[in-house]
Amino acid sequence: MDSLQPSRRPPLANTCIRGHLPARPCGADSNKTRLVVDFYQQIEAQLPLRLVNIPQAARIVGLGHVYATQPMGLSWKELSISWAVFRAVTVHLDIPLDSPLSNVKNAISAQAITLVAAVDEAYALGVASAARLLTLPAKLHVSGGITSPTVRDRIRSEGAEPLLDSGTVVETIAAAKASAARINNAIFQDFLRFSEPNATSRWIVEGFSPFLQEVDKQLRASKVDLVVIPVGAGLLAEAVISHFHDSVGHGNPKILSVEPDTAACLWKSLEAKALVTTGTAPTIMGDLRRGEIADDSWDILRNGIDVAVTVSDFEAHQAILDLEKWHVQVGPSSAATLAALRLIPETRLAKLGLSSESTAVLLCTEGPAAYTVPHFVQGNDPVALTQTLVQIDSSSSTISTIPGPGETQIAHYVTAWMEHRNIESHWIEPVRGHPSVVGVVRGTGGGKSLLFNGHLDTVTLKTYEGEPLSGVISDGKLFGRGSADMKGGLAAAMVALASAKSMKIRGDVLLTAVADEEGYSVGTSDVLSAGWRADAALVNEPTNMEILHVHKGFALLEVNIYGVAAHGSRPDLGVDAICKAGYFLAQLDQFAHRLQHGQGSNPKIGPGSIHASIIKGGEEVASYPHFCNIILERRTVPGETPAIVEEQVRDILQSVADSVADFKFDLKLTFHRPPFELSLDHPFFKLVKDVVSESTGSEAVVAGAPYWTDSALLAAQGIPSLIWGPTGYGLHGKEEWVEIESVGKVATGLSEIIRRFCE
């Protein structure tokens, strides 16, 4: 078995176990189980389960036998949810639980019953399927929306109406309750918090009992030593723990739970020794995407789970491929059980009392499902990570005439990469469609904090010649849109952040992977507005290994020149706004010339500049244009404020108005960002210069830049900042590349800066 990567989230031995389970009336009642079986047999001819022996898996992990349950029809989840909905209907109708399904369907139709449910993506499809099986109209209030188009289409194909809710879980539950109150003869069920008094979670747990009894039957009294369970809300785990602890002859097997890296609510709750709510991110293990364990399940899980692990989407994908080779057809949530078993080293198995004579059962509860092959997150090589980032299209959704997909997909990847390493991550998205991610490695306390900043977005792919998402490496260069600007620097910062986990440092290390730097820097502004700060910052833009301590700012101004509309044959009535604008543009050109030949405040960046970026005017050929709109871009240097810039342009306009008849205008400063400068005497500069010199093997080059970066926003909040990143070429151009050797050197240098600054 491969050894675990030291940087991944480790298997967690549960220290909460008290040796006994709290009582809860679920799963152990044989009469109730008989009713569940009868119900399932009215839906499917036989219980859809086959137990498969996988000797290949047993050899890999060092056990005697590994079995997997092979779902043959509807998933365990769909059937158990169907039982829970069926029970809710019988309670609503006040009819016996052993009523034939056909009679219940007739009653549903006769009384025009509607199911209104509060769900998330993990439960939406199961509830929709249950409603179809019962011919029950359903309105599903889906908390957080549905990220998978496949799931969305399948829900609609089941006949349910998904109502997407962007609010909180509590708000979604409230909305669903209010909706149910407005509908005559509606049944409300909460699949989010499983709030009483509807007992939905208990009924779902009941619904799992026939499958577990079938496992017992097919094992023919063989002793089970280890059960591996996929965990979402924890209801299956509750059923399994209760079954194997309550039933005679099981011998209390060890229980191994598995969750997605990006939905690790059980792992984090066991670590905290308290029930916690966590953020989640999209995963191919969609059935397991839950941010909290069901309240009523928590006591049983914390007293019954022996070891908890989390796995990446890529690991689940690899497990699917292996299981397919071994003729076991399951979906990602089920394949995660094999991925989890692989993560337990033989030394840990021995501590659990397991050996080459032991038997393990992988509880695979759903059949094959379509999914997009996920990206690899396990590696710590900054060059390979750069390749992956380049292969994810994150071209801006706002700045180009043909919008790209934006930053959401790459932000999800960065989150998954961090969560795989158990790095604290925070999703920041006040502007929908422009998410930023903050990763934090906490120090022991009392040290200085360091922030790395890198942007997720790129410019358009349309101007790139060749394959913009290839990430191909040739002649020591990695090619693709964003390779230099700035996925190489972002990858180096991510690897450095991960390296901090193994350092004994006192200060915190932060990475802000931000949106919209190519546009209006919404991401860094959002991160700062959320309160994130540090004692110093490094922006890892491509600087060709030079340290940039100063750069220009910019301001955007909008000028409107007004004329009078008239027929083209009536010069006596019309005033040509475009011609009038020409007087201004001539004066603007002279001003631009004076700026260019003036002296700037810092020779490393030169003087300020101005140019007309966009001009619009006129409606048709045969008319005098009544309006001419001009957009100006002004590049500023330290000491030039927005007020100064606006006053300069207004003076030009007014001088034209004073000398040109019928010249009318207005002026608006629409956007601005400050210039940036850090003194060369600052101790942070001296530390960075020393490390860069050591990393490159020569005296560090100190320079400035004519362009703008997010470092100015950081500096404006009192965070001493510098810019240092890899060597690259072709930013925004038809071909772009980053030098791979420089990416590695930046990653190494950033790690050393962490060690010295945060000690």
Image (cartoon, rainbow, N blue to C red):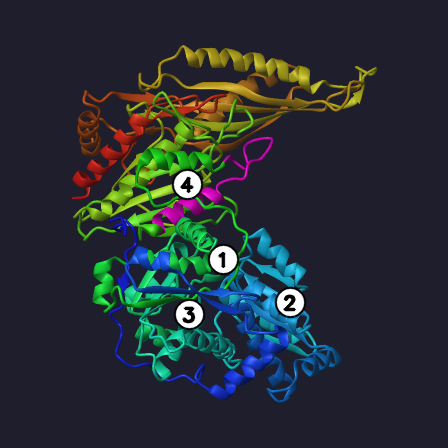
Nearer to us in this view, 640 or 505 = 505
Frontmost of labels 4 and 3 is: 3
Disc 4 secondary structure class: strand
Q: Which residue was labeled with disc 4?
A: 514
Q: Mark 3 and 2 residues: CB-CB less than 8 Å, in contact?
A: no
Q: Nearer the viewer, residue 255 or 673?
A: 255
Q: Is residue 179 visible?
A: no
The amino acid beneath tag 4 is: Val
- The residue at which mark 3 appears reads as 234
- How many C-alpha atoms fall within 10 Å of the one at disc 4: few (<14), some, or many (≥20)? many
Label 1 and label 2: CA atoms lie apart by: 26 Å
- Which numbered tag is attached to residue 139? 2
Percent of width and height locating residue 563: 70, 22
Whether pointer 1 and pointer 2 mark residues with C-beta atoms closer than 8 Å, the reply is no
Mark 1, residues whose alpha carbon is within 10 Å: few (<14), some, or many (≥20)?
many
Q: Neighbour class for label 2 at 10 Å: few (<14), some, many (≥20)?
A: many
Q: Quadrant of residue 242?
A: bottom left
